[in-house]
Each structure stands twice: as C-alpha cells, then as structure tokens.
Amino acid sequence: MADSTRSILAQQMANALRALRNGLRVIRRRGPSQIQFWFIALIIGIAAGFAALGFRLGIAALQAALYGTDDVRLLHSHAEQLPWYWILAIPIAGGLVVGLILNRFTPDGRVRAVADVIEGAAVRDGRVEIRAGLASLAASLITLSSGGSSGREGPVVHMAGVISTWVSNRIHADGITGRDLLGCAVAAAVSASFNAPIAGAIFALEVVLRHFAVHSFAPIAIASVAGTVINRLHLGDVAEFNLITPGALQFYVELPAFLLLGLICGVVAAVLMRGIFWTENMGDHLQRRIGFPGWIRPAIAGAMLGGIAIWFPHIIGVGYETTRIALSGELVLVTAILFTVVKVAAVAITIGGRMGGGVFSPSLMIGALTGLAFGIIATDVLPEVSGTHALYAFAGMGAVAAAVLGAPISTTLIVFELTGDWQIGIAVMVSISLSTALASRIVDRSFFLTQLQRRGIALAAGPQAYVLSLLRTGAVMRPPEHKRAADPERCAVLIADGVCVTPSSTLESAMPMLERGEDGFLPVVVLEGDDTKPRLVGALFYIDALKAYNRALAATAAEEHS
C-alpha cells in the first residue's frame, strides 16, 4: 500500500513538472495569456519587493557596521559624536570601492538608475542592462552606506528592471509585454520602498511607461500590492512620516501662500537639477584636463562629502532623520536654510561625482527644509491666518520631489501615503502643480528626461521625436532585385559623392539626407574594408521611410490607448 501511494505521488509530481515545462514552452513560443501574465506579474512583484526590502536592510546593516550605531534612524545624531577623521575616511573608502566596481563592470563608469529604466521602456522593448544594473546596485549600496548623499529608490527601480528583463528574455516577450513587465517590477519596488501601493502603481505608469493604458493597469496594480505586502510583513503597516501637529488650513486666506511656496520649490528643484548637471560637467572637464582615471572620481567626491559631513552630518545617506525633524518643525529658520543649501551641494557632488543612489529621497528632504523655512516666515508674518510649520514642510516636500521627478500625480500620492494624513491634500496639490509647471520650463520636463536628453535620447517631446532612432535602414530598404529598385547608375553617382547610408544606420540619421536630396532615395551600402569600394545592397526610399515612421507611430498610439 505504501509503495502504491509513493508511486501515485511520484506520477503526479512527474505530471506536474511536465505540465510546467509545457506551459513555459507555450509562453516562450506564443507569449503569456492574460491569466498567465497576471501570475507572472505577481511573481515579479514579489521578487522586486524582496529586492527593495533587501536593499534597504543591506544599507542599514552596512551603515551600522561602518558608523558603529545600533539605530541607523538616528545616524546623523550619532555621527556628530564620531572622530572627524572617521567621518572623512568612510566616504573616501566607499568612493574608491564604488569607482573600482563601476570601472570594472560598466562600459562608461556610470551608475544606472531611473533614467535608464525609462530609456529601456521607450527604446529597448522594456529591457535594461543586467550586468551594469547589478554593478550599479552594489555601487549604490556602498555609496548610501558610506556617506553618500543620495536616495535608495533609483538603484531599487533599476534592480527591479533587471528582474523584469531577465523574465522577459526567458519568455521571449515582445515590446508591449516587456514594457508591462517592467512597469510591474518598478511599481512593486517603489511600493516596497515607501509602503505606498497606490503611488507605486501610478509612478510606474506616469514616469516609466509614460502612459495610462488600461491593459497595463491590472498587472501593475497586482505587482504593486505584492511589493507592499512584502514591505509590511517585515516592517509593519506604518507611515514613513507623521504629521506631528495637525494644522487648520485656512483655505481661502492661506491658499496664496501655498501657491507662492510652489513657485519657490520649483526654483529650488531647478537649482538642484542644474547643480547636479553642472557638477557632472565640471567633473568631466577636470577628468579630461587633468587626466586622472575614472575610478578615482567617486573617491574624490567622497573626500568632498566627508569634509562637508564633519560639520554637517545630516547629509549622510538618505537623510530621513533630518526630514522627520524638519516635518516636526524643530529647526529654526537659519538652520533650515543652511541645511537646504548644504544638502543641495552634497547631492550634486554625490551624483555628479559618479557615486550611486537616486534623487527622490534627497528631494524629499530638501523640499521639507524649504517648506519649513517658508512656513516659519509665513506664520511669523501672518500668524492669525497661518497653519503650522509642519504643514508647509509637507507641502514643500511634495513640491520639490514632484518637480524633480516630473511626476505630480504619483508624488502627490506618495506624500499622502508616506504621511497617512489626507487632510493636507489641497495644500500639497496646489504647491506641486506650480512647482512642476515652473521647473519643467527650466529643465527638459524632469531630471530623468533631461539626463536622457544630455545623452542624445530625446524622449521629452514624445514618440514622434525618438521613434525614428528605433528604425534601421536595413529593415526598410528595397534590395537591388526589387521590381521598383533604385537606378544602379544613379546609386553609383551618389555613392561616389558620399551620399549613402549603411543597413545599420537609423532613419533618424537618414531622413535629413533624404529631405535635402532630389532623388527620393539613398543608396544603402556595406563597407567591407578600408581598401575596397562600398558594395550596394539596396536603396532607402523616402516614401518607404515615411510609411515605416507612420506604422511605428500608429503602433505606439495603439499601445498607449489599449
């Protein structure tokens, strides 16, 4: 009887494994069905949630080891008691390790973060770099643990992208499926990082996918909830920040103050972003001029951060302790302003110095300090009609973060979910709307899109501005045997004049040549060697290029409105 039972169980196990293998084979060949896709979204959400939680716990453990504190939530207060040389040495050592990691495992020594995930969604069928992403995660972990002044959401979002990329490659996902899986992973990572399931889902749609297609919402919501559950199972259902002193907002009288705060926060956000870009440009210039190796650059940034941290330890790491103090209104005006200026400089040095981390958490801290400073002034000028300092700090926190991310909807929701207090909604929304509108005029829509624009990837203007860069000449050209092929003699003349393209050229580079020419086509050639003549393999016709462009735009519109 026992042998018979074991035989039946073994047979059932074998059948289950066979069914699983057959299911994976079908998914690879035909793509997942809707139910299968939701199941995959759930698995990705759980994996991304664990990755975000592990990254957070890893930072806490390494910070505790390096700075010798039992409670990393009070790291800044503890750092004030440490010897100055230790405060200086830790970020230098961390920067050196970061430089070695990035120099060894990335082609350009640059940390991958949210901008690269946005690029992957737009132009890489929802894929990101796996090897460079893992190196960036390690570099960001060391940066945030050793005194770097940045945030943890950037590397976590990219790590989530690495997870979804691995899954997409395994099931041979097409562009639409790959992008949806990427959105699922990002939503789960953001939700697990901030205990904010609603904001996590909206962030993935608003910032990464940059559309609100109905077909994407259900799997992204499933993954976002999964990520939040992972967070709450370990950390509990608690808000990251609490509004200590409830304030009575005098809507009709006090609302202009929040409008003005939004404009000020827009300027502060623009200064933060421009400061990062200026520091990065300066670092590139000095690196070329002096000729020091790229792996030294993060160590130099670490030395600068260590020097600042000796006097201002609040710049170390994510900075939630200082953010909580600002939101509780415990800082005086001069200190709030000084901390804001120093934090902006520290973030610019960290990111411009090619260390790791993101910009969201620093922008929360800078926004809270800015809002507190403004609130102190506002309540002193008109004390009878003003709310509390904390109310302005919360509004400023959301306003700066929204302007930096270019994500007013998800940032509004994140502030609500971080605080657990929905009574400040109107003040936050008013400040966010004006700060985002002003900052988007100064930079190219957001920090992330400006980063991509500086690399030559124009996503801010929409698909019509970048879709040509996705189309290759070889896929659109007419071969010589085509019944309406180009005249070979005319092609020979154009090739002799250097007016030709290769099959790997993009339509983005070919279209200006087509528009300047009078023939309506360009020869497509293969360069087989320095001493041989280009070999004609086809011709790119203007009308074919326009048709391909229109088809690509139509496919993009169909995905965004499905």
Image: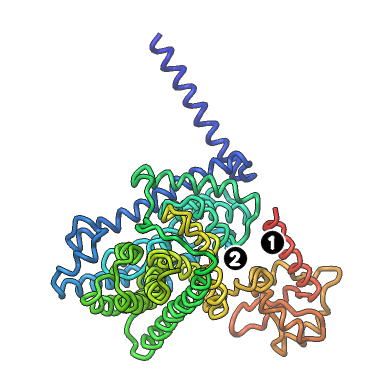
Residue placed farthest to the top in the image?
1
* Badge number at residue 143: none
In the picture of the structure, the residue carrying the numbered disc 2 is 123
> Viewer-proximal residue, 235 or 496?
235
Apparent side of residue 112 relative to residue 18 in the rendered image (left or right):
left
The residue at 55%/67% (across/down) is 252
Can residue 178 be seen by looking at this rendering?
yes
Badge 2 marks a residue whose secondary structure is helix
Tell me which corner region of the image, top left, top right, bottom left or bottom right, holds residue 77. bottom left
The N terminus appears in which quarter of the rendering?
A: top left
Can residue 241 be seen by looking at this rendering?
no
In the picture of the structure, the residue carrying the numbered disc 1 is 556
Cα–Cα span, label 2 and label 1: 11 Å
Tell me which corner region of the image, top left, top right, bottom left or bottom right, holds residue 130. bottom left
Task: Residue 283: give x, y in percent of width and height.
Answer: 38, 83
- The amino acid pointed to by label 2 is Val
Task: Residue 228: give x, y in percent of width and height.
Answer: 44, 47
Task: Residue 234: give x, y in percent of width and height.
Answer: 34, 44
Instruction: Give the class, few, some or many, for how many residues have Cα within 10 Å of label 2's Cα (few <14, many ≥20).
Output: some
- The amino acid pointed to by label 1 is Thr
Residue placed farthest to the right in the image?
483
